[in-house]
Image: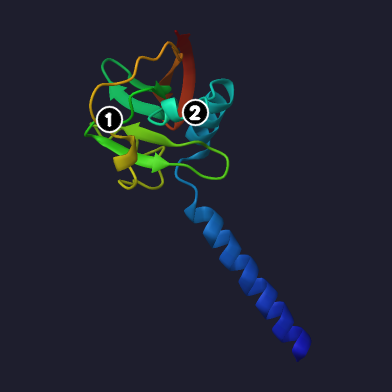
Amino acid sequence: MKINLLYLFVFGLLISCNNAKKEDVFFNDNLYNEILNYQKKNPIPNKSLYKLFIYEVSFSKTRDTLLTITVSPTGIRSKNSYGIYRDKVTKPSYIIDSQNLSNRFMKIYKKDSIKSYILEGTPPHIDIIYPVYKYKIEGDKLIFIDSLK
């Protein structure tokens, strides 16, 4: 009887841990991997001057549906944004999507913790230029187009 209770306790603990991990997943695997790849190749320096730097993921549509990933040195600029997304691996990121194009790539839409990333006053002079990764969206796939600097 004690062994059965122990198994039930361990099983319940495993289920609750899996549920906690699922809640931390904000993006589908395609978008998460591309954001993580960009962040590894383009780290933000960890100094007080760079406190407004945040990774920006933007969905837009002209002829094609596009996704861009870059770094915003002046914090959050768009009122049509969602954020702040971060976990144990990814750094703070926010999403711009005024046309609701991200629904296939987003699991959770957040509007919290953005206040510390909104610029008050004049932006600091920053000499760093980060590349913009550009992707075409086809269905639920992201197809890398180009890296612009």
Mark 2 surroundings within 10 Å by alpha-carbon count, few (fewer than 14), some (14 through 19), many (20 or more): few
Secondary structure under the numbered disc 1 in the rendered image: loop
Query: Which of 15/39 is in front?
Result: 39
Query: Which of 45/56 is in front?
Result: 45
Residue 25 in percent (x, y) is at 49, 47
- The disc at residue 119 is 1
Query: Which of 132/43 is in front?
Result: 43
Which quadrant holds residue 132? Answer: top left
Amino acid type indicated by mark 1: Leu
Query: Which residue bears the numbered disc 2?
Result: 47
Residue under the image location 50 percent in, 30 percent down: 35
Residue under the image location 57 percent in, 40 percent down: 89
In the image, residue 143 above or below residue 102: above
Q: Is residue 84 left or right of residue 146?
A: left
Residue 85 in percent (x, y) is at 42, 41
Amino acid type indicated by mark 2: Lys
Q: Is residue 118 left or right of residue 50?
A: left
Secondary structure under the numbered disc 2 in the rendered image: loop
- The disc at residue 94 is none
* C-alpha gap between disc 1 and disc 2: 17 Å
Mark nearer the viewer, 1 or 2: 2
